[in-house]
Image (cartoon, rainbow, N blue to C red):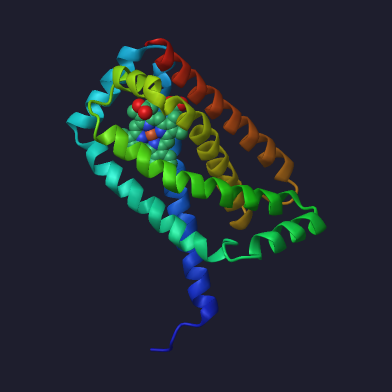
Amino acid sequence: MTPRSPADIRSRLDAWQALSGACLALFVCVHLILEGPEVLSPSLTDAIGWLLEATFAAQIAAPLIVLLILFHFWIAARKMPFRSGELKIFVDHSKALNDPDTWLWLVQVFTAVIILAGAFFHVYTVMTDMPISVAETTKRLHNGWLLFHVIFLPCVILHTGIGIWRLAVKFGYCSKTARETWRRRIWVGMGCYLLLGALALTRAWCQG
Ligand code: HEM
C-alpha cells in the first residue's frame, strides 16, 4: 500500500471538516426551529420537550453533539491563528487584501472559540436540569443565563451562516455569478433565525 501524501491527508481532513460542519449546521437549524413554537405557544414547546425526552432523542443527541463539536473544532484548529504573532499577521494580511471572505474567516475563528466553551455549558445545564420545558428555561434565564444567550445566539447564527456560505463556495454550489444572490439569501436566513431565537428568549423571559 502506498503511503498517503500530505496533500491527500489535507483533503481528507477538509472533507471531514465539511461533513461535520454540515451536520452541526443541520442540528442548529432543527434546534432553533424546535425552539420557535415558544413564540406562539409555550405549551407546544413543552410537548416537544417531553417528546424529545420520552423518546431519549435529547439524551442520545446531547453527548453526540458535544463530541461532534469537539471533532469539528479539532480538525479546524490546524488552520487557526493560535500561535503568538499569527493573529497579527493574519489581521495585517486581511487589511492588505481587503477581501470580505478573509474577514469572515476571522469571525469564524472568534465565534468557534465562544461556541466550543458555550455549547458544553449550555448542554450540561439543560441536561442536568430536566425536564426540557419553558418553565425551566424561564427559571434559567432569570438566574443569569439571559446574558449567556444574548452572546451565544448571535455567535451560533453567525458561525452557522458563514459556514454554510464557505461550504457553498468551496463545493461549487455558489458560482461567481450567483455569489450576490447566495450572500443575500444567507444574510436573510441569519436575520430570520436571529429574530426567531430572540423572540423565543423574550417570550420565555416574560413568562417569569
Ligand atoms: C441536545 C442538546 C441540546 C439541548 C437539549 C438544548 C436545549 C435547549 C433549550 C431548552 C434552550 C432554551 C434555553 C434554555 O432552556 O436554557 C436552548 C436554547 C439555545 N440553544 Fe440549545 N440545546 C442543545 C444543544 C445546543 C447546541 C449544541 C447549540 C449550539 C451549538 C445550541 C444552541 C442554542 C441556542 C443558540 C439557543 C438560544 C435559542 C433561543 O433563542 O431560544 N444548543 N437549547
Task: Pinpoint residue 186: horizontal percent, then vertical percent.
Answer: 62, 37
**What is the quadrant of the N terminus in the image?**
bottom left
In the rendered image, the vertical position of residue 145 relative to residue 121, given as above or below: above
Q: Is residue 89 visible?
A: yes
Q: Going 23% across and 24% down the picture, which residue do you hit?
A: 50
Residue farthest to the bottom? 2
Taking the image as shown, residue 162 lies to the left or right of residue 199, namely right
Question: Quick one: 172 or 119, which is closer to the camera?
Answer: 119
Q: Is residue 27 visible?
A: no
Residue farthest to the left? 54
In the rendered image, the vertical position of residue 176 relative to residue 60, given as above or below: below
Taking the image as shown, residue 52 lies to the left or right of residue 82, namely left
Task: Pinpoint residue 84: horizontal percent, then vertical percent.
Answer: 61, 65
Q: Going 28% across and 47% down the picture, which residue do you hit?
A: 63
Residue 145 occupies quadrant: top left
**What is the quadrant of the C terminus in the image?**
top left
Question: Quick one: 70 or 36, which is closer to the camera?
Answer: 70
Give the number of marks.
0
Residue 90 occupies quadrant: bottom right
Task: Pinpoint residue 175: horizontal percent, then vertical percent.
Answer: 69, 51
Q: Going 33% across and 19% down the picture, which residue do you hit?
A: 139
In the rendered image, the vertical position of residue 145 relative to residue 181, given as above or below: above
Task: Pinpoint residue 62: horizontal percent, then vertical percent.
Answer: 29, 42
Q: Going 43% across and 46% down the picture, which residue do you hit?
A: 117
Q: Determine the quadrant in which ligand 1 lies.
A: top left
